[in-house]
Image: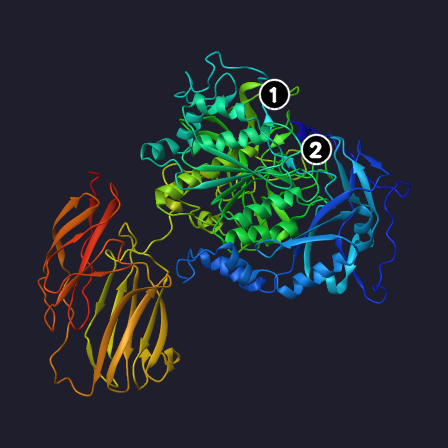
């Protein structure tokens, strides 16, 4: 396709001294203050032309976040089941308040650029980016660097720095990156049209007819939607009713698409997904391109129940960065797919400006997938040189990079690393030169001595010779028109986005969040290891596949049998967990009493290595937990945390030095899960107090928008005697009291046709019992 062709044919030359550009006069007030380089100079591709006319240009300034270290810690805690922050994602306004740039930083940077006559827009909603625009003359003055006007080969006029741009040290201190002034070489897509079968249309008029049950690619060199679904386990999910409903996939595009192409494609498969557009900076300058068409058809076709929102921006100036910021600030896309990228080492790139945007997305629980590039281990091919390099943004630490495979058979599965010397295409991968290895990037095959981020994280089909069959009718000459095969790592990003949308619905959650920590935790169970092939496209010492993680295929391809369930968050289940108190009365100045918690998930599986947090509050004395003096926080108060063992068990021994009642609460993932009261006495002369045993539900009846049930009393009534019952229909998060003495209840005004799990517990003056086993019931529609 055009963007890729342009990239491979580029020969770079530096902007020479004889080129006409806007001169940079001395800046006022800066003579005594050191200046710091914030942007490198642009490289001008051969075929682009420098013109004399100054233009109006825009750029983005990413601001320093004062709480960057705290933000890193917070994002890590979102994936940690033992953290109270686990899956407690932020809204955009909460992110801005807690981690965005300070008011003083915003004001200082705004004032500086405004002093040069530049227009400074409002701060982004996440308090990360300032959008600045103005004439190249004023931009040159602000950065003390000449700025040229360049007419790209596609006719678009862009601003290009002739030399390194600098800012006064005090201003540069508040900035982490500048994007939009080095966009002479535009980000390129990672789609590759199959050259083996150009312009071959299906005689049936639809790729779903006749080939869906085949285990190999059609004569058109591609796989149909149904074949992809079988390959990646989506067919089974669809049968279970999981189509991505409730999810929104944001598709990042720097080019347009033809709505008529989508209509033909969707009607062929008898689906009608929701596709809407958000135009950023006026939308794309180009017409329909194969990249946008592929991305939308792939994502919508594989997750037809999800909403597709296409964020379209111009492929010049600040457009590429503004689109990411808009996706973060809107925070409506639960999953984001981007198949556009640049060589990480490209001097025209802006990874440092993008990084805080992707971290904002991670803090908000947005999942981001990016194609890892189509030049194997040499992603800078045609931009800088063929040296080892990876693709941005797939190498970003808060993005999941998707590599490329050749799939020659679905069943039995036969796949290898995509490598095609003849068409100069291979799955991207290698070491980042910018980002350190994140703490979560640990898996078999990764040496602990490695220090840099590795790409890809996982891989999917990409070879255009066995690619994805889509429908595209370009307005200009193309290697493909109508139904034909397309490939490249572009396939993987929307494919994984669709799979994640389906998984989120299957898991019953609104969003899954940043998934890389989850992927590496399930390295040995969630993926099919790819052990053959290599991505050293240019013979510069690239990478080979092997057992475990490698930089040719990442963790491997998603295992259709385990991948979806593996993405489901660890969810505490009150009915399947248990809490045991040895006694509600204990002597002072002894070992006291013991609470044993066994934490389980909704499937009854133990949740191991997760923190259970205890807080105790009494009137006096020294309350200790597990005889640890550091647990005492004040007179009569204590806090303590214990990590569950392999069986999900955590044990707390509570003692006190003074008589009186001590209230105890256990919390898991920041939520209270058990409460009791312990009476410390000087002698055990009073009768022992115990909570009731576990009750059960003897009968449940579905009503129209309601439920009725009958409780069977526990065999152990407790001391004092049992007094009442409570019920819950939300897994014990809230409890509703039944009438005193009642053993049955009706729950009305519920949603019709919805499944509920009813649990009950018994109470006396000592406390409450363990919840009953859950009883599932579906409310009647009529």
- Nearest the eye: 434 or 48: 48
How many labels, in total?
2
The relative height of residue 660 versus residue 438 in the rendered view (above or below) is below
Instruction: Find residue 285 and report its horizontal and vertical position in percent.
Output: 67, 33
Distance between the alpha carbons at the discs numbered 2 and 1: 18 Å
> On the image, numbered disc 1 is attached to which residue?
195
Q: Do the residues labelled 2 and 1 touch (CB within 8 Å)?
A: no
The relative height of residue 58 versus residue 214 in the rendered view (above or below) is below
The relative height of residue 149 versus residue 39 in the rendered view (above or below) is above
**Coloring scheme of the render?**
rainbow
> On the image, numbered disc 2 is attached to which residue?
7
Instruction: Find residue 396 and report its horizontal and vertical position in percent.
Output: 59, 48
Instruction: Find residue 401 and report its horizontal and vertical position in percent.
Output: 55, 43
Quarter of the picture containing the C terminus is: top left
Does the rendering let one see residue 441? no
Other-residue count near label 1 (Cα within 10 Å), few / some / many at <14 / 14–19 / ≥20: some
Q: In this view, does 394 lie to the left or right of 176?
A: left
Mark 2 or 1, closer to the camera: 2
Tag 1 or tag 2, which sits nearer the N-term?
A: 2
Tell me the number on the disc at residue 568: none
Q: Is residue 625 left or right of residue 520?
A: left
Does the rendering let one see residue 485? yes
Please identify the residue farthest to the right as the structure is shown: 18
Instruction: Find residue 150 and report its horizontal and vertical position in percent.
Output: 80, 38
Helix, strand or loop at label 1? It is loop
Residue at the location (58% across, 29% down)? Answer: 257
Quarter of the picture containing the N terminus is: top right
Residue at the location (33% across, 35% down)? Answer: 241
Helix, strand or loop at label 2? It is helix
Other-residue count near label 2 (Cα within 10 Å), few / some / many at <14 / 14–19 / ≥20: many
- Quarter of the rendering containing residue 561: top left
The relative height of residue 677 versus residue 275 in the rendered view (above or below) is below
């Amino acid at each position: 396709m055009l963007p890729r062709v342009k990239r491979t044919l580029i020969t770079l030359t530096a902007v020479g001294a004889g080129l006409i550009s806007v001169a940079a006069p001395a800046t006022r007030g800066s003579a005594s203050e050191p200046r710091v380089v914030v942007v490198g100079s642009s490289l001008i591709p051969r075929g682009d032309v420098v013109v004399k006319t100054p233009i109006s240009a825009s750029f983005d300034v990413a601001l320093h976040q004062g709480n960057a270290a705290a933000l890193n810690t917070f994002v890590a805690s979102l994936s940690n089941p033992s953290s109270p922050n686990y899956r407690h994602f932020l809204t955009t306004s909460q992110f801005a308040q807690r981690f965005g740039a300070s008011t003083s930083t915003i004001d200082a940077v705004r004032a500086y650029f405004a002093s040069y006559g530049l227009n400074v827009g409002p701060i982004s909603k996440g308090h990360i980016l300032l959008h600045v625009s103005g004439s190249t003359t004023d931009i040159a003055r602000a950065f003390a660097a000449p700025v040229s006007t360049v007419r790209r080969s596609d006719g678009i006029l862009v601003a290009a720095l002739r030399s390194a741009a600098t800012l006064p040290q005090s201003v540069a201190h508040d900035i982490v990156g500048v994007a939009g002034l080095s966009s002479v070489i535009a980000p390129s897509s990672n789609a590759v049209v199959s050259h083996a079968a150009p312009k071959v249309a299906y005689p049936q008029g639809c790729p779903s007819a006749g080939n869906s049950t085949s285990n190999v690619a059609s004569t058109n060199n591609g796989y149909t939607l149904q074949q992809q679904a079988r390959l990646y386990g989506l067919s089974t999910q669809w049968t279970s009713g999981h189509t991505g409903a409730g999810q929104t996939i944001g598709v990042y595009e720097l080019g347009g698409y033809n709505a008529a192409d989508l209509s033909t494609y969707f009607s062929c498969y008898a689906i009608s997904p929701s596709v809407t557009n958000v135009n950023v900076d006026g939308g794309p300058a180009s017409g329909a391109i194969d990249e946008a068409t592929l991305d939308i058809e792939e994502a919508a076709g594989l997750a037809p129940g999800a909403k597709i929102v296409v964020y379209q921006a111009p492929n010049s100036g600040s457009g590429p960065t503004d689109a990411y910021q808009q996706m973060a600030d809107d925070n409506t896309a639960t999953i984001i797919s981007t198949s556009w990228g640049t060589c990480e080492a490209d001097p025209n790139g802006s990874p440092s400006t993008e990084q805080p945007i992707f971290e904002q997305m991670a803090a908000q629980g947005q999942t981001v997938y990016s194609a890892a590039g189509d030049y194997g281990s040499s992603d800078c091919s045609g931009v800088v040189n063929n040296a080892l390099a990876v693709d941005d943004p797939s190498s970003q630490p808060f993005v999941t990079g998707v590599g490329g495979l050749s799939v020659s058979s679905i069943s039995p599965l036969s796949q290898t690393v995509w490598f095609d010397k003849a068409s100069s295409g291979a799955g991207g991968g290698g070491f980042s030169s910018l980002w350190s290895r994140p703490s979560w990037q640990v898996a078999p095959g990764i040496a602990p001595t490695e220090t840099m981020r590795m790409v890809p994280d996982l891989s999917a089909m990409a070879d255009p010779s066995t690619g994805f069959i889509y429908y595209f009718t370009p307005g200009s000459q193309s290697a493909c028109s109508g139904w034909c095969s397309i490939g490249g790592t572009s396939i993987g990003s929307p494919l994984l986005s669709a799979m994640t949308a389906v998984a989120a619905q299957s898991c019953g959650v609104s969003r899954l969040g940043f998934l890389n920590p989850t992927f590496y935790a399930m390295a040995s169970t969630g993926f099919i290891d790819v052990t053959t092939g290599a991505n050293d496209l240019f013979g510069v010492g690239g990478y080979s596949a092997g057992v475990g993680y490698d930089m040719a295929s990442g963790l491997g391809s998603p295992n259709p049998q385990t991948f979806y369930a593996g993405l489901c968050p660890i969810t505490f289940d009150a009915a399947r967990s248990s809490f045991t108190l040895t006694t509600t009365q204990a002597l002072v100045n002894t070992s006291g009493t013991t609470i044993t918690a066994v934490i389980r998930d909704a499937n009854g599986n133990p949740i191991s290595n997760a923190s259970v947090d205890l807080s105790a509050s009494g009137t006096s004395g020294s309350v200790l937990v597990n005889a640890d003096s550091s647990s005492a926080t004040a007179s009569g108060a204590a806090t303590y945390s214990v990590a569950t063992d392999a069986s999900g068990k955590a044990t707390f021994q509570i003692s006190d030095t003074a008589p009186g009642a001590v209230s105890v609460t256990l919390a898991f993932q920041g939520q209270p899960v058990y409460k009791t009261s312990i009476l410390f006495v000087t002698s055990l002369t009073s009768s022992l107090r115990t909570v009731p045993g576990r009750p059960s539900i003897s009968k449940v009846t579905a009503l129209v928008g309601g439920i009725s049930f009958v409780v069977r009393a526990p065999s152990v009534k407790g001391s004092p005697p049992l007094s009442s019952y409570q019920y819950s229909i939300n897994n014990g998060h809230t409890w509703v009291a039944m009438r005193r003495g009642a053993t049955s209840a009706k729950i009305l005004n519920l949603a019709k046709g919805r499944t509920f799990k009813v649990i009950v517990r018994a109470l006396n003056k000592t406390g409450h019992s363990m919840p009953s086993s859950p009883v599932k019931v579906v409310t009647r529609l009529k």
